[in-house]
Image (cartoon, grey):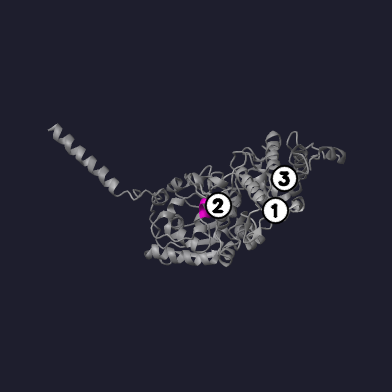
Amino acid sequence: MKKIIRNIIYILVLSLVLIGCSTDKCKVDNEGLCEIEKIAELEIEANAKIIIGVFNEDYGIDLVQSFNQAYPDHQKLLSYEVISSDDNEQLLSHLSEFDLIQLKSEYVPLYFDKLASFDESFSNLLENEKLSKFSSQINQSANYFIPFDVEGLLFVYNKTMLEEFKVDLSDEDNNGIPEAIDSFEKIAELSDIWRKENVLYLDQAIEDIFSFPLNDQMAMLPFLQNSDYRLIQGVSAEMMDLDENLLQALEGLKTLGSYAWKYNKDFNNETIWNYEQVLIDQSAPFLLVGNWMYYDHYQQSKAYELVFTKLPTLNNQEMATISSVSGFVLNKDSEFKNAANMVLKHIKGVEGTQVAINNGIVPLINKDLLNVEGFKLDANTKQKIKAYQFSETSPLQAFSQNQKVRGWDIFLENDFRQAISDVFLGRKNPETVQKEIKVIISEWLSANEIIIEGLNDERPQSEETDDKDVDPDN
């Protein structure tokens, strides 16, 4: 009798397991879709009304329509209003009017006391390696911020031109950038070959290899912060690294600038980032392009193909462009938090992601989600979604002495373009520029009444000392 009972129990348990497996929506070999499916389907409150604040009106219109199709029993639940992406005063004064609000990531910590966390089931989505890097600084205690979209500069190569030059564009490791050009050293070697062979494209000798944005500080930061160097190295902005690692990064910048990126002898006087002219003339095989630029127009009108990808390495170290990320937060005073969570699940799902892409928005998602049958997007958008996952956002660490001041403000409120150019073009030694950077930061810290031991007493060098440190080879 006991054996029969055990067998019955075994059969019941096995049946439950099989039922669980057969109803598991995530048995689809699509990690991105599984992350969405694992978000809880919460019961939407009766008579729920959700107002969402978004940056883009067309996106707001299409999002409401898409949500209504997905939730036909809640046709009047969702409405939208357009808000400014950079107007903090507007957001602060009208925050109570919204349930869900689109915010740039750097602004979210300013509103923590006004936010509620999203349902815990979103944690599976946020644990994705590619998404967590854009939210982990914010979501240290709870899931207050769900990344949504990204914009910024990406490394781009002219596929049509490189194929003309017989460059092998195979990508065996599937990281988005061909092995033949996945380091600046390899690109420099190609540059030397093309220069010696005087290669032609569109019946013109190429003169530029890569247009470095020496006149744009934010665009040049990835090339300054090479060799894994970051100015802020800890949990507070006081933890700055201005010593050996900075010097090593400046040495890397000097090495990068020593290659033949421009064949014209007047390169040392050229500090203009001429990306648009490159797009028009196809005068260089490599450049930086942002997703707001009219790159698609030039591709169509000039009949060539661009590919967006991550930055090549330098000295076997990964480098990352700086991106601006926005996401959604939940008002703690919202009366309908279940409904708000369901709206966000829709935004991050297949239908919501398609709405974003249809409106020219580059969503931050697990790229596997794009493999769902019927998904529509062009090649460049797919490339950008993948490439932006290798980018970084501006760090959020504030000074413990003044929480209103971030370490990143150093780059926003000071001009390092001359220092960066002097190293890159070989006009000054890295040691000299390191001291100049420390002086700039020291003076800025003093102006903000922030004290960092050993730094605030930095003094400018005399002109005589500077002259002695100029590289004699330049």
- Which amino acid lies under the numbered mark 3 shown in the image of this protein? Phe
Of all residues, the one furthest to the left in this rendering is 1
User: Which amino acid does the dot numbered 2 rest on?
Assistant: Lys
Q: Secondary structure at mark 1?
A: loop
Query: Left of 241 or right of it: where is 468?
Result: right
Q: Position of residue 198 (x, y in %)?
A: 66, 53
Q: Are marks 1 and 3 in contact (CB under 8 Å)?
A: no
Check disc 3 and report the residue beneath it: 424
Identify the residue under disc 2. 166
User: Mark 2 vs mark 3: which is more N-terminal?
Assistant: 2
Which callout, 1 or 3, points to the residue nearer the camera? 3
Q: Residues within 10 Å of mark 2 (few under 14, many from 20)?
A: few
Q: Secondary structure at mark 3?
A: helix
On screen, 161 above or below 225?
A: below
Query: Quick check: 313 left or right of 25?
Result: right
Q: Which residues are magenta?
A: 383-388
Q: Compare marks 1 and 3 and give the one earlier in the sequence.
A: 1
Circle 2 sits in a helix, a strand or a loop, which is it?
loop
Quarter containing the N terminus: top left
Tag 1 residue: 216
Q: Label the magenta part by its dominant secondary structure.
A: helix
Give the amino acid type for the residue marked by disc 1 in the picture: Asp
Where is residue 284? Give x, y as percent. Answer: 64, 56
Sequence-wise, the earlier of marks 2 and 1 is 2
Q: Residue at x 46, y 51 (%)?
A: 367
Q: Nearer the viewer, residue 283 or 426?
A: 283
Q: For residue 405: magenta?
A: no
- Residue 318 bears which disc, if any? none
Q: Nearer the viewer, residue 296 or 366?
A: 296
Between circles 2 and 3, the one closer to the viewer is 2
